[in-house]
Image: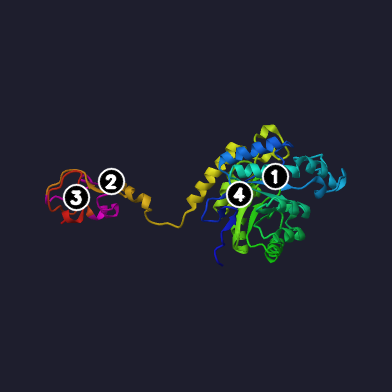
């Protein structure tokens, strides 16, 4: 299979030839104030991250206004235990009238801004803002009519793979491509909040990359940056993390979100991890050439006169490395010296015999 092509996201390329593309997911961490949303944009810009992602929906476009049965979150392990779906989405959504000010602030900060739409009306609205990239959330990755509508814009699509089987993903990717999408990035995702490192399974990234011949990244809901960095060694070229100003401020997603200083660390360390992958290399790298002189080699350890023999006392294997390699040491013992040699002389074949 051919090597997967890079993807162009606005003015940046995403692929193995480039440092990982880092996206800060704002989600509901604006805590329902536009000023805080704009503060998050400014803080993210200072970290060196490449983009901010929003979510475009209302409670009414997501669910029904019911507080019973399957419309209520009854899992005691959930961060949102006791809330109805409608209440949660109403609290977490980003008001649509905020989108333009947020997009404008991102532009001022040289950040790419894009969003996840959750229904067709959100796509139409985002198109009116010239949204450059679309994200399909894990819970919508089997909503083929939605995928088809997004793909028809012709813009790059990022698809989270949470919960999806390989056959479901195959159907989703095929639908996107057949509907006009030329640039797709798949994100390995565990749809649990927070997710554990043990359930991240970033080894799947290389399989996704090979199977779908596209760029693959990680939508990471774990705490910290360990899982994100590990994903790079499996070929991740795109990393998305939720971000907040301070977890202490609270908010619907704050407990598994990075603070700005942590996001900055992810930007720096993800680039280092990408650089460290390099290529298969044996023998001295160019940067190691100067270090060859410090290898061990055989040196004269005492003054020796012509006709004397080499012994364990008068030759030693030491640093630096200008003498014969240590593998010849047993062979040299007992051999005669053909001229006077001083202590500190690197051993060479021309003084033997």
Q: Which residue is mark 3?
A: 310
Does any portion of residue 94 appear in the rendered image?
Answer: no
Does any portion of residue 150 appear in the rendered image?
Answer: yes
Residue 116 within the magenta-colored segment of the rendering: no
The magenta span reads 306-331
Up-down relation of residue 150 to residue 112 (above or below)? below
Q: Which residue is mark 4?
A: 239
Question: Dot 4, crowdedness within 10 Å: few (<14), some or many (≥20)?
Answer: many
Q: Secondary structure at mark 2?
A: loop
Horizontal and vertical percent for residue 341? 15, 47
Horizontal and vertical percent for residue 302? 18, 43
**What residue lies at 29% left-to-right and 54% top-to-bottom?**
327
Q: Which mark is residue 226?
A: none
Q: For marks 2 and 4, give the CA distance.
A: 45 Å
Horizontal and vertical percent for residue 21? 58, 50
Q: For marks 2 and 3, give the CA distance.
A: 19 Å
* Mark toward the viewer: 2 or 3: 2
**What residue lies at 69% left-to-right and 32% top-to-bottom?**
249
Q: Nearer the viewer, residue 119 or 192?
A: 119
Q: Are marks 2 and 1 in contact (CB under 8 Å)?
A: no
Question: Dot 2, crowdedness within 10 Å: few (<14), some or many (≥20)?
Answer: some
**What residue lies at 53% left-to-right and 56% top-to-bottom?**
16
Horizontal and vertical percent for residue 320? 28, 46
> Sequence order check: which comes first, mark 1 or mark 3?
1
Q: Which residue is mark 1?
A: 100
Question: Dot 3, crowdedness within 10 Å: few (<14), some or many (≥20)?
Answer: many
> Sequence order check: which comes first, mark 2 or mark 4?
4
Q: Nearer the viewer, residue 166 or 21?
A: 21
* Mark toward the viewer: 1 or 3: 1
Q: For marks 4 and 1, give the CA distance.
A: 24 Å
Q: For marks 1 and 3, give the CA distance.
A: 84 Å
């Amino acid at each position: 299979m051919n090597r997967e092509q890079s993807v162009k996201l606005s003015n940046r390329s995403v692929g193995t030839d480039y440092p990982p593309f880092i996206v800060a997911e704002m989600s509901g961490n604006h805590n329902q104030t536009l000023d805080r949303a704009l503060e998050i944009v400014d803080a993210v810009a200072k970290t060196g991250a490449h983009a901010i992602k929003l979510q475009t929906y209302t409670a009414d476009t997501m669910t029904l206004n019911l507080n019973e049965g399957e419309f209520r979150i009854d899992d005691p392990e959930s961060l949102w235990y006791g809330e109805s779906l409608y209440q949660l989405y109403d609290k977490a959504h980003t008001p649509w009238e905020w989108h333009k000010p947020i997009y404008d602030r991102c532009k001022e900060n040289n950040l790419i801004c894009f969003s996840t739409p959750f229904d067709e009306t959100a796509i139409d609205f985002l198109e009116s803002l010239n949204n450059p990239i679309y994200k399909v959330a894990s819970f919508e990755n089997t909503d083929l009519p939605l995928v088809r509508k997004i793909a028809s814009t012709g813009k790059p699509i990022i698809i989270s793979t949470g919960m999806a089987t390989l056959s479901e993903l195959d159907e989703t990717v095929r639908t996107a491509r057949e509907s006009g999408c030329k640039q797709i990035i798949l994100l390995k995702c565990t749809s649990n909040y927070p997710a554990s490192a043990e359930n991240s399974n970033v080894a799947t990234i290389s399989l996704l990359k090979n199977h779908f011949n596209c760029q693959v990244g990680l939508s990471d809901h774990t705490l910290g940056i360990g899982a994100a960095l590990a994903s790079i060694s499996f070929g991740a070229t795109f990393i998305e993390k939720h971000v907040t100003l301070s977890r202490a401020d609270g908010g619907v997603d704050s407990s598994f979100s990075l603070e700005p200083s942590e996001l900055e660390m992810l930007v720096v360390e993800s680039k280092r991890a990408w650089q460290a992958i390099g290529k298969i290399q044996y023998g001295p790298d160019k940067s190691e050439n100067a270090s060859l002189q410090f290898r061990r080699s055989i040196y004269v350890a005492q003054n020796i006169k012509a006709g004397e023999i080499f012994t364990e006392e008068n030759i030693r294997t030491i640093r630096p490395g200008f003498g014969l390699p240590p593998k010849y040491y047993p062979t040299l013992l007992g051999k005669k010296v053909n001229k006077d040699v001083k202590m500190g002389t690197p051993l060479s074949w021309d003084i033997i015999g």
